[in-house]
Image: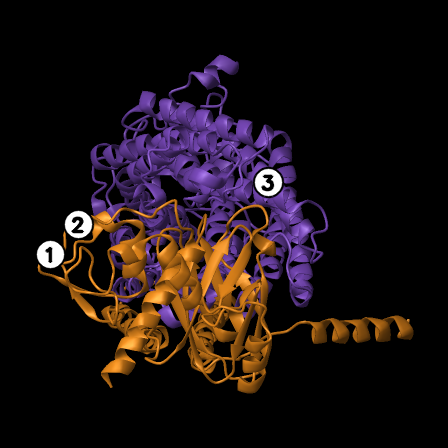
Chain colours: A purple, B orange
Amino acid sequence: MSTTATIDQAPGASSEPQVNYLNARYGIKSWLLTLDHKRIGLLYLGTITVMFLVGGIAATMMRLNLIEPQGALVEPETYNKLFSTHGIVMVFFFLVPSIPATLGNFLIPLMIGARDVAFPKLNLLSWYVFVTGCCLMLYVVATGGVDTGWTFYTPYSSLSSHTDVFLAAMAVFIGGFSSILTGMNFVVTIHKMRAPGLTWFRLPLFIWAMYATSLIFVLATPVIAVTMFLLMLERLLHVGIFDPALGGDPLLFQHMFWFYSHPAVYIMILPSMGVISELITAFSRKRIFGYSFIAFSSLAIAVISFLVWGHHMFVAGESVYAGLVFSVLSFLVAIPSAVKVFNWTATLYKGSISYEAPMLYALGFIGLFTIGGLTGLFLAALATDVHLNGTYFVVAHFHYIMVGGAVMALMGGLHFWWPKITGRLYPDLWARFAALVIFIGFNLTFFPQFVLGYLGMPRRYAMYPAEFQALNVLSSAGASVLAVGYIIPLIYLGWSLRHGQIAGPNPWGAKGLEWTTQSPPLTENFLKTPIVTEDAYDYETAPEPEVVRA
Amino acid sequence: MMGLTQFALHSTAAAWAMIPLTPPTASSIAESVDHLYYFLTGITVFFSVLIFSIIFYFMVKYRRRPGREFTPETHTSMFLELSWTIIPSLICVVIFVWSSALYVRNTRPPAKAREMFVIGKQWMWQIQHPEGPREIDALHVPVGEPVKLTMTSQDVIHGFYIPAFRVKKDVLPGRYTSVWFQADKTGTYHLFCSQYCGTNHSEMIGWVYVMSRNDYEAWLAAGEQSESLAQQGASLFKKLGCDSCHTGTASTTGPSLAGIYSKPERMADGSTRVVDDSFLRQAILTPSTIHVAGYPQIMPTFTGQVNEDQVMQLIAYVKSLGAQERTKGQ
């Protein structure tokens, strides 16, 4: 954007800027008490990486166990704890905060030309709340784990399980407050702190996506808090809300749980969609196709996401009529998602496309999200859902969305903004290699699970009939490829922190206010408040990329 | 080297042969569900291939090359936006109508179905045939005859799932859910628990034996249980003293139970409810929630005195009274 923002450094400079948010102050205290949204973003990044590793180790052990029909590694009891740990950690302590709390925190003020978020202290508090939830969850895992699955269905969780459901529910309960605080902070920041001239329809689509996500954070998270609170009450006092023997209703729990957890799916995927809009435009050097359609489809998804929870319960004892209503609403939510995919594809048309690592992740996202979305139709359709519900088909479907979608986008976003965050470039060849490994590993892991589901293999099985073995072995083989794919970036990104080439303020020649300031940015972000005079993604006026692939 | 290649090829082919791609189809609805499944697979493949090909074409055609003149343009088109909103919407309408019609048809049990009871408990399936036999983790059914299962759980939520029949229904504590099917191929098929229920969830599995009518009758006759479910219910009915109020004459404190099954009953609040399995279960376990018109609400609860098996025996008994009444009437 042709703004008056100061570029503190000539493009292509080979030395790091003298002062930036990373070296402004040193010491552990300067991090733990920081109010800088960028540092808080990095604190979150560190935290979710630890949680991702914990969840990933659990997943690896699960896949190892499933190589043999009788279980190759652990007892069923342990297996149940593994998938519960995997689910709870990955959903509540990795995916939900992943893009919003890391990239969102880092980028929202930079993208809207603000000095910080609206409430910096609240922002730090939300990280502390989150870490408290994480520590509690890790404590639960370390002291024997929990075996309810991430869904905590009653009355198993409330009456039957012998594990520490109380503390696990408490961890989710506490972690939720961090979402609420972050959501409120973002909504206010986006409303009140945009730079002069940055009208709503000039905002980068990442901001629109974060705005829609924040609305869900604020409106849906209290429901999971209430649900977990009631579950804790059941564990502690056995008041009987979910116990049929005392006149309670176990299905009430499912309604409440999914009233949050379906919108939560969009908490996980909407920010990814925002990231993809940024990446596709930057690497095809074009305006986004159908800006307002993408922007409004985010809001449409956020609104409709609150009305589809019943599609998780088609075979749970829901009436036929409720099933019909939830089915039609679920199809409705597919439309705005399709609109986005078509618009991203059309953005490539007549672009000038290059294939640096972030773009590979973005294209991978579109492919995997398309498959994930289309297979959702099988589950929104009542007649097929009866057969597929509760099987590996569902597992494959939501991993295509959550991993193929959300994690691919997180990786793409990290690689795209890594030079901005750290001021360094990573080795592009390694990065592209890792993106390829992840794509292949992912498909090898999860595609066979669609077939397993159609064959009828139920999820959450520690053992399975022998005829399912071949596909399970394939899936486990894929998981090991996937694991390698995730470890490679950990290595070269870590390496780049010290040894990476100095990035310069705008290595990709990308548009957006965040690229007009130095890398890494100053603590204050901008020396002068930028004034915006043009639309987002105006790549006609973009600087040439400095990074040219060998 | 040649040998190695051959070995690799052979083992790949062998591995491929080991991978099943479709589940067995053994019920009257299985094929209709599969047709929808294949249609959806077609839609998925079509759109995936469409989008992948377009992306791939653009990737190659518009890749960044030194010296290529590039003028960014076309960043909006109402025609395209409307097309790719309306066309997917129409496809969704087709899928919705198709799948919903199928679902409504598949879930409604036919009037004359052979009825059986299922109790799920950690971690086994108990099947109760009205003729008396009871089986664990096995379900014998006759081929070509609709079977309706009335199911409940003794502890947590389970899921009753027969992949070959394409039927699944959660089994809940404290209420009845039901599922029906008509097996149309003899054979042995998996029965799974599809709702996570604790430590040995993955061992809560069994077999469904679909037999010819004659084999099934022979199997029933060979059962150890000499009394039918209704007979067991009748003795329980006496033992619990139910007959002191439900004497069968209209003047007593409790309504006569003869012939009431599957008939509408007037409630004190003016509404009517059909007397079905769920109604009877509720009347036995939580009578305070049912107030039949014309009778005082004085029935004590039998929660804790009867277990789910016994409730089913009592229901079978009440049902059998209905049958006698109807026979008399004819």
**Marks 2,1: beta carbons within 8 A:** yes
Q: Is residue B5 left or right of residue A379?
A: right
What subunit carries mark 3?
A
Is the same chain shared between marks 2 and 1?
A: yes
Q: Which element type, helix, strand or loop, lies under badge 3?
A: loop
Closer-to-camera residue (A95/A189): A95
Q: Is residue A225 left or right of residue A103?
A: left
Numbered label attached to residue B268: 1
Question: Mark 2: which amino acid?
Answer: Gln
In-front residue for pair A238/A103: A238
Q: The C terminus of chain B is located in which quarter?
A: bottom left
On the image, numbered disc 3 is attached to which residue? A426
> Quick check: can you spot residue B207?
yes
Q: Amino acid at mark 3?
A: Tyr
Whether residue A191 sits left or right of residue B323 in the image: it is left
**Residue at left 65%, top 51%?**
A63
Q: Dot 1: within a 10 Å radius of its alpha carbon, few (fewer than 14), some, or many (20 or more) residues?
A: some
List the single residue furthest toward the left: B270
Q: Quadrant of residue A6?
A: top left
Q: Is residue A112 left or right of residue B255?
A: right
How far apart in space, not on screen, are marks 1 and 3 (Cα)?
A: 77 Å
Give percent across and percent down for residue A387: 46, 68
- What type is the residue that disc 1 sits on? Ala
